[in-house]
Image (cartoon, helix red, strand yellow):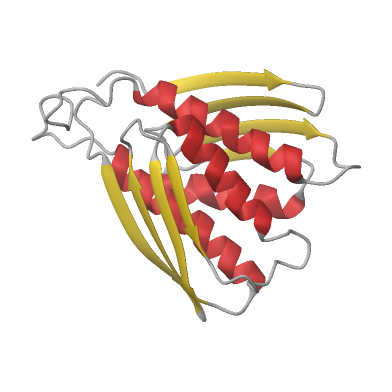
């Protein structure tokens, strides 16, 4: 099988990001964004997706975390899209229910080349103590747009903000792991259009 790797860099007035990924890795990661909770989320994303991740991000954290989180999602989605190539032989679809204590999340993915995010959570969903819950959605939106994937995230229930964010990142990782995996029975591109 052809190597499914990518190295991407993005530099703006707000952030500077360098990223290398291997879709067929072992879930090892080296992550530094300057945001401790976000580093934790990306580390567990790598572990549960089995995507090796080497990421350094420098952002305008004196403003807030938004630019760093969103731009990281942009670069990660773009790198994954490049590493997938024409998507020949992959499952394409993936879904996962992720429980974490009192929390249950459902994530469904289609690597369709048609970007869309459907993100459902109650308006009063709590944030983790040091990470706004709205940034979880922003990360998912940036990833969906740049991976060009159809991603549905639904918080079925939960009370603890840390658990909710972690369940979403882990659920996304597991659903993407399934969608990106090769199926030896798929000889071409998994679409009747013969293109994705």
* Residue 79 as seen in the image, left or right of residue 63: left
Q: Quadrant where the N terminus lies?
A: top left
Query: In front here: 125 or 37?
Result: 125
Q: Position of residue 159 (x, y in %)?
A: 60, 80
Q: Is residue 145 above or below residue 42?
A: above
Q: How many labels does the image show?
A: 0
> Which residue occupies 10% across, 26% down?
187
Left or right of 2 on screen, residue 39: right
Q: In this view, does 36 lie above or below 164?
A: above
Residue found 58% across the figure and 32% down from its top: 74
**Which quadrant, please, contains the C terminus?**
top left
Left or right: where 165 falls relative to 27 = right
Q: Position of residue 71 (x, y in %)?
A: 66, 33
Percent of width and height locating residue 109: 35, 47
Please state which of residues 178 and 157 is positioned toward the viewer in this rendering: 157
Query: Residue placed farthest to the right in the image?
Result: 62
Q: Front-most of 26 and 87?
A: 87
Residue at left 39%, top 38%? 149
* Residue depicted at 82% across the width and 23% down the height: 13
Q: In this view, does 167 lie to the left or right of 187?
A: right
Expressed as whole percent of the image width and height from the top left, the position of residue 169 reads 52, 55
């Amino acid at each position: 099988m052809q190597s499914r790797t990518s190295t991407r860099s993005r530099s703006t007035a707000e952030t500077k990001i360098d990223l290398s990924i291997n879709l067929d890795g072992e879930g090892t990661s080296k992550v530094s964004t300057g945001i401790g909770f976000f580093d934790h989320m990306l580390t567990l994303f790598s572990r549960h997706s089995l995507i090796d991740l080497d990421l350094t991000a420098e952002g305008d954290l004196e403003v807030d975390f938004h630019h760093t989180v969103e731009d990281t999602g942009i670069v990660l989605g773009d790198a994954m899209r490049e590493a997938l190539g024409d998507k020949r032989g992959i499952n394409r679809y993936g879904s996962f229910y992720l429980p974490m204590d009192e929390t249950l999340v459902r994530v469904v993915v289609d690597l369709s080349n048609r970007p869309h995010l459907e993100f459902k959570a109650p308006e009063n969903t709590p944030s983790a103590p040091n990470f706004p819950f709205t940034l979880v959605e922003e990360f998912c939106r940036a990833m969906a747009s740049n991976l060009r994937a159809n991603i549905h995230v639904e918080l079925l229930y939960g009370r603890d903000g840390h658990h909710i964010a972690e369940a979403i990142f882990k659920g996304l990782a597991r659903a993407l792991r399934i969608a990106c995996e090769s199926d030896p029975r798929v000889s071409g591109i998994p679409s009747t259009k013969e293109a994705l």
